[in-house]
Amino acid sequence: MVPFAPSTRSPDEPCGPYTPPRESSARVGGPASLLDPGTERDPHPLYRTLRANFPLVRDEPFGAWLISRHADVRAALADPRFVAPSPGPVPAHGERRTHDAYRAIASAALRNQVSAALRAGVERTAHVLASRLAFRQEADLVAEFCRWLPAAAAVTALGLPYEDTLRVHAWCRTGLDHLGGHRPGLDAYLRPHLARRRAHPGDDLLSALCTARLDGRPLPDGTVTELAGTVLGAAGETTARALASFLANLLDHPGQLDLIRARPGLAGAAWAESLRRDPPLQIVSRRALEPIGPIPEGATVACLLGAAGRDPARFADPDRYDIFRAEPGDLAYGSGPRHCLGAPLARLTAEAGLLALLTVLPGLRRASGPRPRPEGLVSRSPRTLPVCPR
Ligand code: HEM
């Protein structure tokens, strides 16, 4: 086995523009559609066909051009001719400028997110959640652990009261909507917290947003609540799904789980491997700003992260879950100008969660009965994870 080496590649690293394959392989009308019955249950047979024979193909029912090979997905995500989809035909220049400004603010606010205090808070919550399962015969890790820990981590990072986690949880379920989406109700909830942070800023994420300046002026309250909402949606739902797949992968490979029990430092490699094999966001969409090979201007392009993570041209024996993989995956968090800003918080949450479960529940194993399969085409993870906690 080759020891794990963390990826040295930065998601910002230039990788050259996306080059469409020769016309012959860029056909309209592929072998099947993402929307065909059966694909959602298991998309990997279709992903294999796409990678091998249709690296760029128009999926008419899905309404997008599909890109599936690792190198192509990485290049497309970094290529400025592809932009994140927006409500209009093509994003206005002003819209992109706003996004860039918001991204710079969120990025600065999140840069020092993993403080000792945040780590301690997430670890404490993970222990509380695990301890609640300690005397149970059976439990569902998705409903009772995975959905709560990332929400509590986001609450802690923002500096909101821990006891508000239940309330904030609903805003975490909305998922990633890019920087600045509106969440009804969140604004009213956050306003009193904003007033306090503006008067007495602390070292939490909400204070960082309240003290940030755009064109020399503080951000309006509405913008701060939208950015906080994006953090909750991105951190809560996406990390919850990734955590469910992570725990499922380890429970399916008890030998590798035992190795982590003995050497907890392996947890980070195990997390990276799960994100490669089973990324929670399987599809990231883009819109073409100009014609690119057969892709017309304005067309939607689906970058298949789930297919890229299992590309045999990049990863040996790609379907295997192997925490000692020499080349870790690098696309689950996206790539290029929109890559994820929350990877350190997600990793902290996953590691703290796993280590708490292993410490508090040393006998943790899958419950007998049928194994729940991952569900979802765009966001994908097991909906339940029945376990015997003791
Ligand atoms: C395992 C957990 C996570 C995964 C797999 C993940 C994945 C992603 C991906 C693929 C994107 C890029 C979308 C695109 O290119 O269109 C993204 C963007 C983003 N993520 Fe994450 N994410 C995770 C956790 C988090 C957390 C914990 C936070 C916040 C603390 C966060 C904040 C963001 C933000 C703000 C963006 C938008 C960036 C932009 O629009 O420029 N994510 N994430």
Image: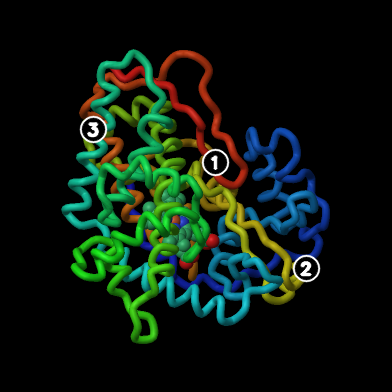
Q: Residues within 10 Å of mark 2 (few under 14, many from 20)?
A: some
Q: Earlier in the sequence, mark 3 or mark 2?
A: 3
Q: Earlier in the sequence, mark 2 or mark 1?
A: 2
Figure quadrant of the N terminus: top left
Q: Earlier in the sequence, mark 1 or mark 3?
A: 3
Residue 37 shows in this picture: yes
Which residue occupies the foreground of this view, 142 or 171? 171
Q: Residue at x 50, y 49 (%)?
A: 174
Q: Quadrant of ligand 1?
A: bottom left
> Which labelled disc corresponds to residue 98?
none
Find numbered disc 2 in the image and state the secondary structure of the residue it sits on.
Answer: loop
Mark 2 vs mark 1: give the one in front: 1
Answer above or below: position of 51 versus 82.
above
Residue 329 rendering spot, x and y as whole percentages: 45, 51
Q: Amino acid at mark 1?
A: Arg
Which residue occupies the foreground of this view, 269 or 203? 203
Residue 197 rendering spot, x and y as whole percentages: 24, 65
Q: Which residue is mark 1?
A: 380
Ligand 1 neighbours mark 1 (CB distance < 8 Å): no
Ligand 1 neighbours mark 2 (CB distance < 8 Å): no
Q: Do the residues under discs 1 and 3 have CB atoms within 8 angstroms? A: no
Residue 382 rendering spot, x and y as whole percentages: 51, 33
Q: Amino acid at mark 2?
A: Pro
Image quadrant of residue 110?
bottom left
Q: Which residue is mark 3?
A: 128
Find numbered disc 1 in the image and state the secondary structure of the residue it sits on.
Answer: loop
Q: CA distance from mark 3 to mark 2?
A: 54 Å
Q: CA distance from mark 1 to mark 3?
A: 27 Å
Q: Which residue is mark 2?
A: 294
Q: Residues within 10 Å of mark 3 (few under 14, many from 20)?
A: some
Find numbered disc 3 in the image and state the secondary structure of the residue it sits on.
Answer: helix
